[in-house]
Each structure stands twice: as C-alpha cells, then as structure tokens.
Amino acid sequence: MPLMEPYRIKVVEPIPITTAEQREAALVEAGYNQFNLPADVVTIDLLSDSGTGALSAAQQAASALGDESYAGARSFFRFREVAEELTGYPHLMPVHQGRAAERILFTALLKPGQFSVSNTHFDTTRANVELLGCTALDLPGPAARNLDEPSPFKGDIDLEALHRVLTDGTPVGLVIMTITNNGGGGQPVSMANLEAVAQLCRTHEVPFFLDAARFAENAWLVTQREPGYQNHTPREVARQAFDLADGCVASLKKDGIVNMGGLLALRDPDLAGRCELLLIATEGFRTYGGLAGRDLDMLAQGLREVTDPAYLATRADQSRYLGDLAVAAGVSIVQPAGIHAIYLNAGRLLTHLPPSAFPGHALALELYRRGGIRCAELGSLYLGEFDEQSELTKPAPHELVRLAIPRRVYTQSHLEYVAEILAEIAKDPERVPGYRLTHNPPLLRHFNCRLAPRA
Ligand SMILES: *Cc1c(COP(=O)(O)O)cnc(C)c1O
C-alpha cells in the first residue's frame, strides 16, 4: 500500500500569506534575525519541531478530563501509568520541559570539575552542565564527520574515545546519549552502540542516561536500518533502549507531541529522592512538576500515539521526500535525511560567501525573503568563535541550515512549496547577500543578535 498520513485534518489554522515588501520590512524590523520575526509574517515555520506539533482529537478529549487537583491529581496517575509502561523506570517526575529535567538531574548528580560525556550534548544540556562548573565533552563517531556519506547510524558515540576517557583518569560524572542526535544532524543511534555504552558504563561504574526527546523516531530508524530489528515494533525498541540506561531526561515537546512538557525518569531511589526535592523547590509538587493536569493527560495520550508505526513511517517519509527535493534542486543535505529535520549544506551552495558573511544565516534569511519560510542556521553565527570586535576568529566546521518539520502539521504540498523556493534560490545562488553583525551579545548570540546585509 502506498504511504500516506494515517490521519485526516479536522481543525485548520490559516497560514499568513505575505508580500515581498512586507517580508523585507519584517526582516529590517527583526534586525535580520528570524527569532525576532512575529509569527504572523511567517508562512511556513520550520524553525523548530519543539512544542509545534498538532494535537489529535483524542488528546483534545483527554485535555477535558484534566484533573487540576494540587496533589495526587488523577491526571498524574494516568501519565505515570503510560510513562512507566513505556520506559520501565520506577521513579517518574513530570517537569515543564526538557531543560528542567537536565538541571535537576545534573544538580543532584554532578560535582564541580566533573565531566558529562555524550555523543553530542544538546545546547541546553551543555549549558546546564557548564552552569555547575563541569565540562560537557562531545564524542561523536567518525561517520558523523562526513556530511555526504549516508551511513545509517551517524548519531553513534565514538566508543574508542569513550573507553579512553573512562580509563585515563578523567573525572566522568555521567554519560548521556542523545537519541536521535539533534546536534549531530538529527542522526539516529544504533542499539549496538547503546549496548556497548551501557556495558562500558557498568564496568566503570558511571551512571548512564538517555536524552530521550526523540526516543520514538530513533526507535523507528532502528527498525528500518539495524539488522535484527526488522520485526520489532518501535515501542519494543524504545523499551530496550530505556532498559539499557539508569534513567532519562526528555523534552516531551518532541515525541510527547504536546505543546509543553518534559520528563525525568530514574531507577535509583536515592538519586530520585534528591531530584524530587529539587523538583518541588523549583518546578512544582511531584504530581504535577510545573504542568497542568490537562497537560499530563494530553501527554499520556501523545506518548501512546507517537510509537504508531504508520505515523512514524509517514513522518520519516516526509523528511526523506523534502531531502530528495532539495537534492534534486541542487542543494546538498546532510546524508541521510534525519527524521525531525533536514540539514541543508549552505556552505556548499553559497560559495561566494566566506564563513564571516554567514552563508547558513544568509540561506535561512533568503528562504524567508523569497517564500516566508522560517528556519534556523547551524553554522558560524551560532557555533563560531568571535573576538571583542565581533570578528569571526574560528568558523564552525560546517555552514548548515536546519529545516525542522513539526509533527502532523504540514502537508506534502507545503513541503513542495519549500522545495520550489529553495530551487529558485539555487538557480542563481550568487544573488544571495551575506551579512555582518551589528549587535553581538556575549551570551545566547543566535537568539539576540542583530545583523545587516553586507554591501
Ligand atoms: C529540545 C531538546 C532539549 C531541551 O528540551 P526543552 O523542552 O526545549 O527544554 C534537550 N535535548 C534535546 C535533544 C532536545 O531536542
């Protein structure tokens, strides 16, 4: 049977259609930073897949059952039942979003000077490690370095390098595997890699966690790509991954398919007790953790829906389709296409722009200028190093643009529209202007900076 979305649309939201003049004025007003654009001038929003998914009718119905009792709400027990069945972890704490789980876990576990080791830390995960006076060490595998090579599991950690840091006296406080590896091109992690990491952590008595924001998407790609898993359901694979670790942090704004929510789940009762004190002090009582009862009910339902193979198959197919269209238009992508996003190789397309003119940002803004499409740069503007005069001193290794695909939101024709705008840009890329920084804040630059086109 040909692939198609296993749902139909019941509620629609009009999308803004703008003129070229309106978009140019919006760019000036925003200081050429897409984070400053108001949503009502954005036609297709591919900035993030976080909290941007569409709720199902069943989730909306569940929301009406939300129990807003301060303590012991029925909603919590419904959430806990689903999360426990999914993960197998006995201690489950809801939090308002993923970064709250990171902060609580690391505060309870890490001592200043220790290392957190990962395939790649997500940016808030890294920030929460560093805020504690610790070091976040990324050890992506060798396959991740080659953007064009379609290796199946480019999210894997470098096991040799991990073995080295676990045996050379580095004070490793924890290992955290991000599935799928968002910072590393949205690439999946194999079960073989997770098993090897679990084994190493057990041998060296280091706690091992998952950053499980996209646990279902990772599990789906395992069933498609890893020998021996073809006959497993995504839910079975996800459970096997959770079984290997001592717990997880998760932004449920991704594979929870809700607008807000997160999870901290643990096996060790002592650690869970310490985390629970921090949870109550900073998020909320243990049966709501910063969420409303209705949020917990929508989450319980979302966590059931997200492992549906028909849903995951079409989601993966959407990203692959957009990736194929981009390549056909002459724009290279990080291969293979991820599942929550595709990553465009702007450095290769805009060869007339040096890293200091921010080719990734230039391509992202051009997609907005020509088509009202919003997306994010992952290149030298975000990851480069700068001196006091805001001159780029160390470019990022690659100049990429991430097109993140919200869950159940856009149709095939929306993606074809994006590809058409991209193809138009790729016809004469030299017309795309570069940019320079006019305001460069020392912290969280990409959110708050302002730029201007280079003359
Ligand atoms: C989104 C995300 C986070 C942070 O979660 P928030 O809900 O945005 O706080 C952490 N890790 C990964 C891999 C993510 O994608």
Image (tube, rainbow, N blue to C red):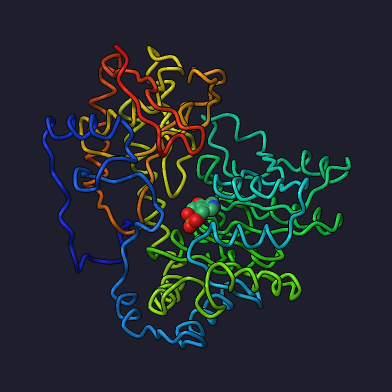
Q: In this view of the protein, which residue sits in the foreground, 392 or 198? A: 392
Task: Please tell me in which quadrant of the rendered image residue 311 appears.
Answer: bottom left
**Is residue 13 toward the left or the right of residue 432 in the image?**
left
Residue 50 image offset from top left, x and y in percent: 41, 54
Question: Which quadrant holds the N terminus?
Answer: bottom left
Residue 123 image offset from top left, x and y in percent: 55, 44
Q: How many marks?
A: 0
**Is residue 9 toward the left or the right of residue 170 in the image?**
left
Q: In this view of the protein, which residue sits in the foreground, 32 or 120? A: 32
Residue visible at 52% across and 31% down?
A: 383
Task: Say above or below: 163 vs 8.
Answer: above
Question: Which quadrant holds the C terminus?
Answer: top left
Residue 193 image offset from top left, x and y in percent: 69, 50
Residue visible at 70% across and 75% down?
A: 273
Task: Say above or below: 158 vs 451.
Answer: below
Residue 198 image offset from top left, x and y in percent: 75, 57
Q: In this view of the protein, which residue sits in the foreground, 337 or 270? A: 270
**Is residue 24 toward the left or the right of residue 173 in the image?**
left
Task: Say above or below: 207 vs 331.
Answer: below
Task: Please tell me in which quadrant of the rendered image residue 102 appears.
Answer: bottom right
Residue visible at 31% across and 83% down?
A: 64
